[in-house]
Structure formats: C-alpha cells, structure tokens
Amino acid sequence: MNNYKNILLAIEFSEHDEAITKKAKDLAEQLKAQLHIIHVLDNIPMPDTPYGTVISLDESTHDALLEAEKSKLRHIGNHLGIAPSQCWMVWGNPQEEIIQLAVKLQIDLIVVGSHSRHGLAVLMGSTAKDILYHAQCDVLAIHLKST
C-alpha cells in the first residue's frame, strides 16, 4: 500500500463528508501521499424561467447557489490543509468526471463513500460502484452508515 503517492477524495457535500475526509486525510498522512479533492456538480436546483435556467453551466458563474458550493469546497480544503490548486469542482457526470481527473492527475487511489443499497437501488447502481468498475487505479470505498 505504500505505492500510493496521489490520492483523490470524491465528496458529495453530505452528512458523511467528515468521516470520509478524516479517513482520507489520515491515509494520505500515513503514506506521505498528496491529497486532492473533487466535488462534481451534477444537480444544482435551477428554477425554470421563460428564458432558460438561472444558472449557466459554467464554472466561472457567480450565482449564490454556485458560490455556496464553492465555499463548501474551500472550507473542506482549508480544514484538511489542501492547497486550492488541489481542490476541484467540475460540472458533469460524477463517475466520468472523477475518473477523468484521476487519469489527468495520475491518481493512484480514489477514495469514495459507499451507501448501502437495497431493493431497486442495487439494480440502478451507484457512483462508487461505477468508479470501482471503470477506474484505472485502485478505489477505496468507505462504507457509509445511514443516519
């Protein structure tokens, strides 16, 4: 396990982030690895207007909802002592964006949270499962307990 030099932590801004970030930070410190964070914007609520959406899908947008997301990412990055250049917020499909960034940054390990799935959710799949099957590096899925 000492081959991990670049770790990518995928967060979703949920009540589970603290547990996931602590485990990822501890692992990065133990391995003396560089820790990166990614949050993928795939579903910011956008009220319909006669002229389209209120938030244009551009990372330089300065809408209040987008600013709140940026602030959350900055806060987590600061809390973990991660440089802003290692904190990523992107638009798109979470599985695809996480895997693409992992390739770009030559990530050795992706850390994600994994929810227990029951019933139809098992058949529908999850982001963690998709990342596990498609990533070109190792994936550590942190089991998230329901609260």
Image: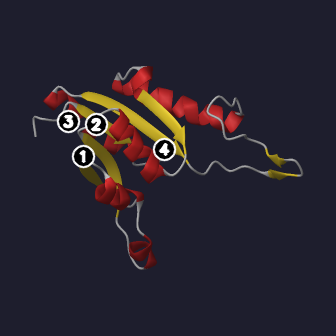
Residue found at the far right of this picture: 50
* Disc 4 residue crowd, few under 14, some 14–19, many 20+, Cα 10 Å: some
SS class, disc 2: loop
Give the residue pinned by disc 4.
Answer: 13
Which sits earlier in the primary sequence, circle 4 or circle 2? 4
Quarter in which the N terminus is drawn: top left
* Disc 3 residue crowd, few under 14, some 14–19, many 20+, Cα 10 Å: some
Q: Splitting the image into 4 quarters, where does residue 3 fall? A: top left
Which sits earlier in the primary sequence, circle 4 or circle 3? 4
Q: Percent position (x, y) of residue 109? A: 24, 42
Q: Residue drawn 67% across and 41% down?
A: 57
Name the one closer to the observer, 135 or 86: 135
Give the residue pinned by disc 3.
Answer: 27
Q: Are marks 3 and 2 in contact (CB under 8 Å)?
A: no
Q: Splitting the image into 4 quarters, where does residue 131 fall? A: bottom left
Q: Percent position (x, y) of residue 53? A: 78, 47
Q: Which label belongs to residue 107?
A: 2
SS class, disc 3: helix
Q: Which label belongs to residue 137?
A: 1
Name the one closer to the observer, 7 or 47: 7
Q: Percent position (x, y) of residue 79? A: 39, 26
Report the mark closest to the observer, 1 or 3: 1
Vertical position of residue 122 compared to residue 66: above or below: below
Q: Residue drawn 64% across and 48% down?
A: 44
